[in-house]
Every structure is written in structure tokens, then in C-alpha cells.
Image (cartoon, helix red, strand yellow):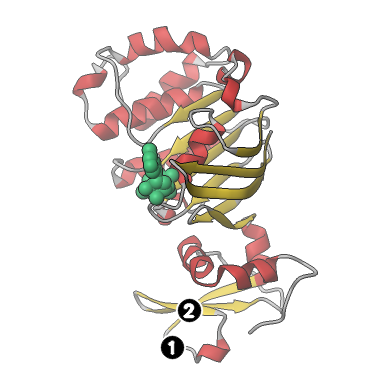
Amino acid sequence: MLTIEKLSFGYSGEGLFRNLDLELEPGMIYGLLGKNGAGKTSLLRLISGQLFPSGGRLDVLGFDPRLRQPGMLRDIYFLPEEFPVPRLTGTRYVALNSPFYPRFDRERFFDLCEGFQVDPAWALSQVSLGQKKKFLLAFGLASGVRLLILDEPTNGLDIPSKRQFRRLAASSLGEDQTILISTHQVRDMENLIDPVIILDSGHILFSGAIDSIAGKFHMSLETTEPLPQEAFYFERVPGGYSVVRRNHEGYDSHVDLEVFFNMVIERGEDVAAIMQPGREEDRV
Ligand SMILES: Nc1ncnc2c1ncn2[C@@H]1O[C@H](COP(=O)(O)OP(=O)(O)OP(=O)(O)O)[C@@H](O)[C@H]1O
């Protein structure tokens, strides 16, 4: 559903992406993780045709996003991190905008509004940032598009709303749909995103399924600090140390995404070597 090959892009001559490759499959909720400034928003804007690459190939739902053809636009919904809202009620917004999305499901939209505790009768310009965001998330999740792109969707949401978002997003996904969520708040996305893509300074350091991580690495919370040679990676956490070891024994363990993210940022090349069969080097 989305293929990126050898993508290059930069702002005013400064290279951000060089030879970037990425493939997204339908039926998944991808998490695009990266620190501030890693390039997440730029990548999302390239995918949705709001920025143009300087080289390489982008295929989004069979379209070249630069052309912004109606066939692509009716199947993509992009919720940016910051967004202006018109001086309209939610109901009027839906009446004006839903016709652009042929598979928009009004009943689902009202259910989602109820789930998010937002009232479509509200004037959008007069509600809080979190309420606006939840309204637009309900719109996006009800739009029926094949590619839903959410840039930092949990920014501005309170803790119960973040939980609601995870629940409603997971229950909204159809087989032919993909959700691509960018965030630097990794914890907010746990138990929702799979696979994960980790971007750092314009490079994809990791792209893969949670299962594949659990197959190669074992994570545990330990009370004592391990010796460096005893662990692949560890960090101090409340209550002790989060310790990552190679999973040679095939143990089942929960993947703590934040720890994995930190590990990839610190040891990206080593993780890549381990994750790729055939190029694996046996490290502790
Ligand atoms: N319009 C622009 N002109 C010039 N440079 C830009 C522009 N937009 C972004 N950049 C730069 O490109 C890099 C990537 O920015 P981008 O917004 O894509 O990162 P991000 O991962 O989304 O960050 P954040 O998590 O802070 O939103 C940063 O170094 C940023 O300063």
C-alpha cells in the first residue's frame, strides 16, 4: 500500500533524507518513533504530497503523492500536530467535509464522538485543544480512508483520553486500512502500534514487528545493576534496571517500547545486525 525507494529530501539544500526505503502493508497500525527533529513530520508530509522529494520513488496507494490526485486524496486523512479549525460547529464541519471521503461512516463518527466525550454540536473554535483534537480524531477514524496519518495524536490529550484513543483506534482498523502514527511519546503508544519504525536524524534505524523484537531480545526488570558484559543494554528505571539480553533461549517477554527505542538510539547498528538474519554477529 505504500512503497518508498531511495527517497531523498532536504530543506533549502540541507539533506534530511538520503536513500530512505520503507514499505507499509495494509491492516497494520505503524508507529513512527523518533526524537524531536528526527524527521517524522517531514516524512509524513512527503507521504501525503505536501512536500516534494528531490529524488527517489514514492508510491502511496498506487499514486505519486506529488500529484495529489483525487483518487489518492479521498483515501488519505492526515491529522497534523497543529491544525487550524474553522468557525463552525462539529456537525457543520462533518456536513462540509465528509463528502470528500466516500466511505465516511456517520454512525461510527457519532459513536466515536461519544467514546471521546465530545459533542459534535460544539463550536470547534471555542473548545479546548484536546477537545478539537478528539473531534478530528473521531472524524479521521470514521473517514474510512485506506491510509490514516496521525502526527503526534496524543499531544494535548489527558490520560483517560489517551487510553480512549488507543482503544478506539485499535477497534477502527479495517483489513485494507493502515494507520501511521508518529510520536516522540513512546509510552502513549504501547499496546497499540505494531510494527514500529524508528527514525533518527533522517535515517530509519529500525523497522519491524514487536514479535520480531521479542524473538531476538529478552527484557526484564532487575533490582541490581548488571555488569556491562552481562547485558546487551540496560537503563535505570524506577524500581531498578530495565535489562535487555539476547534471547537465545526463546523466552517470551514483554517488549518495553521505550526501552527498545532508547536501545536503538544508542546501539542502532548492533540492533540492525542482530535483527537481520544472515548478517547477525553474536554479541552479548
Ligand atoms: N520548514 C522547514 N524549513 C527548514 N527546516 C525544517 C522545516 N521543517 C522542519 N525542518 C527541520 O527538519 C528536521 C526534521 O523536522 P521534523 O519536523 O520533520 O521533525 P520531527 O521528527 O517531526 O520533530 P518533532 O518531534 O519535534 O515534531 C529538523 O531539523 C527541523 O528543524
Q: Which residue is situated farthest in the front direction here?
A: 13
Residue 277 in the figure: left or right of residue 188: right
Residue 168 in the figure: left or right of residue 120: right
Residue 194 seen from this side: no
Q: Is residue 33 above or below residue 135?
A: below
Which residue is tagged 2?
234
Disc 1 packing (10 Å; few <14; some 14–19; many ≥20): some
User: Going 67% across and 76% down the picture, which residue do you hit?
Assistant: 247
The quarter holding residue 280 reads: bottom right
Q: Quadrant of ligand 1?
A: top left
Which residue is tagged 1?
225
Secondary structure under the numbered disc 1 in the rendered image: loop
Q: Are marks 2 and 1 in contact (CB under 8 Å)?
A: yes
Indicate the position of residue 2 as horizontal and vertical percent values: 66, 36
Tag 1: residue type? Glu
What quarter of the picture does the C terminus occupy?
A: bottom right
Residue 139 seen from this side: yes
